[in-house]
């Protein structure tokens, strides 16, 4: 079955409509026991906010085998489509990093969407959707492809990190990738390693809280991260599930995902910056992605046309050499845009809170926080009449205001 694990439904008080972000059906990486498109899974479902009566749905992924569902339905905003028609629209973007601009009344795409052929896999008993929906105009907002030439070079990060990444590629037997919706390779017991790399991975793309919208311009602001999942699907032997948290709990399925690093969902194409591992195989020091940066970016998209207006790296790594640090540091949460033309965002793992010019993408301000701010900023007017911006960082609310 499916659920709504996401934190953010969208409600239109004027029409009494609630827009629900429905997750992918279980199990994440094997769907032989749920053949078909799995209607309502990976979908925005619009219902009557008072009665729950169904109004419409739009499915963003057919028969999800990658855990690329959504955590939010998206913001509402008025747009004028390229054909001159006016719509109240819902701007939906999830872990896949594909942007769908939908008419809020009936769920029909405001900007064109087409079904494209995608490759099938070879897991016994699996059902593969022959096509997936893609926006025609707006490209994916995060990395979706990977080749050997895309591995970081010594000048992208460090020589030690680059060497460790090349070694991981070799240990994994190379990586298969044909773009978004590449199916995980089937691995038979005893066969040599041959791995799939999925981009974006199961954490996105775009994750918690999604996009912010300026209703006066029709522009949306999205921070998307480049993450990956690597490995294959294999037959599960015995009666112990490949659990989400490695506890051995959870549903048992006939097939599940694993890799050269073991069983479980979170192995990615990353390596220690030091290039070293301890005696237990754990990285020494921080690990960074093995594909070329930027690894996270803040993007402005005109929802009227689907065109990208600007995109800038979001976040930095202090551990990297000077001049190579602002490569995008991934995290979860969304931005907030103000009427004054500022985009505030935390959503990085470098303990920073930043403000950008909504028109140009130029960074205007940043503050050091006591913890990572994996939450959306909020803006309010205080009792003293001043305007404040705040964010939850490390379990504490931190607020800022202009000097009086």
Image: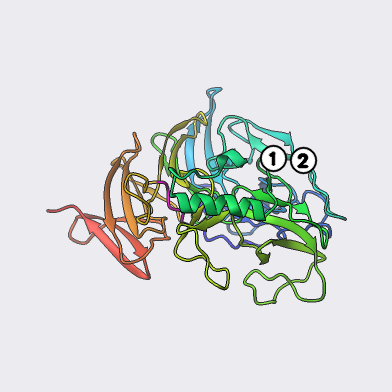
- Name the outermost residue toward the right: 125
Q: Residue 119: which numbered mark, if any? A: 2
Residue at 55%, 49% (x, y): give it: 205
The quarter holding residue 352 reads bottom left
Q: Residue 377 in magenta?
A: no
Using a 10 Å C-alpha cutoff, classify the residue at mark 1 as few (fewer than 14 neighbours), some (14 to 19) or many (20 or more).
Answer: some
Q: Is residue 252 above or below residue 169?
A: below
Q: Residue 178: which numbered mark, if any? A: 1
Secondary structure at badge 1 equals loop
Residue at 74%, 52% (x, y): give it: 194
The quarter holding residue 238 reads bottom right
Residue at 43%, 52% (x, y): give it: 329
| Number of numbered discs on residues | 2
Magenta-tinted stretch: 327-332
Residue 32 coordinates in the image, percent (x, y): 83, 57
Residue 56 coordinates in the image, percent (x, y): 67, 46
Q: Quadrant of the N terminus?
A: bottom right
Q: Residue 73: which numbered mark, if any? A: none
Q: Name the dominant secondary structure of the magenta segment.
A: loop
Q: Is residue 212 left or right of residue 105?
A: left
């Amino acid at each position: 079955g499916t659920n709504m694990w996401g934190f953010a439904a969208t409600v239109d008080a004027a029409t009494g409509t609630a827009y629900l972000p429905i997750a992918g059906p279980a199990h994440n990486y094997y769907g032989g026991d749920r053949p078909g498109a799995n209607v309502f899974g990976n979908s925005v479902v619009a219902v009557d906010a008072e009665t729950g009566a169904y109004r419409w749905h739009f499915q963003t992924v057919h028969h999800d085998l990658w855990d690329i569902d959504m955590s939010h339905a998206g913001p509402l905003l008025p747009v004028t489509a390229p054909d001159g028609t006016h719509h109240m629209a819902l701007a939906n973007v999830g872990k896949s990093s594909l942007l769908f601009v939908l008419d809020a009344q009936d769920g029909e795409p405001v900007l064109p969407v087409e079904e494209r052929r995608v490759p099938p896999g070879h897991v016994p008993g699996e059902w593969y959707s022959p096509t997936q929906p893609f926006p025609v105009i707006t490209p994916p907002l995060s990395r979706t492809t990977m080749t050997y030439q895309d591995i970081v070079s010594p000048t992208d990060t460090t020589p030690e990190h680059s060497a460790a990444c090349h070694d991981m590629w070799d240990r994994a037997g190379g990586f298969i990738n044909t773009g978004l919706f590449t199916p995980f390779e089937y691995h038979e017991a005893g066969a040599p390693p041959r791995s799939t790399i999925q981009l974006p991975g199961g954490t996105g793309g775009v994750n918690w809280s999604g996009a912010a919208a300026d209703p006066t311009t029709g522009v949306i602001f999205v921070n998307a991260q480049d993450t990956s999942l690597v490995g294959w699907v294999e037959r599960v032997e015995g009666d112990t599930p490949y659990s989400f948290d490695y506890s051995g709990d959870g549903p048992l399925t006939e097939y599940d995902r694993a890799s050269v690093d073991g069983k479980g969902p979170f192995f990615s194409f990353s390596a220690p910056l030091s290039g070293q591992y301890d005696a237990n195989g754990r990285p020494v020091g921080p690990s960074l992605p093995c594909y070329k940066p930027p690894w996270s970016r803040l993007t402005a998209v005109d929802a009227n046309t689907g065109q990208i207006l600007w995109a800038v790296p979001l976040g930095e790594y202090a551990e990297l050499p000077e001049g190579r640090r602002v490569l995008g540091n991934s995290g979860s949460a969304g931005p907030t845009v103000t009427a004054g033309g500022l985009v505030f965002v935390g959503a990085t793992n470098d303990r920073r809170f930043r403000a950008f010019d909504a028109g140009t993408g130029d960074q205007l301000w940043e503050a050091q926080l006591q913890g990572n701010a994996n939450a959306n900023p909020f803006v309010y007017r205080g009792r003293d009449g001043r305007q404040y911006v705040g964010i939850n960082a490390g379990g504490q609310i931190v607020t800022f205001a202009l000097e009086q």
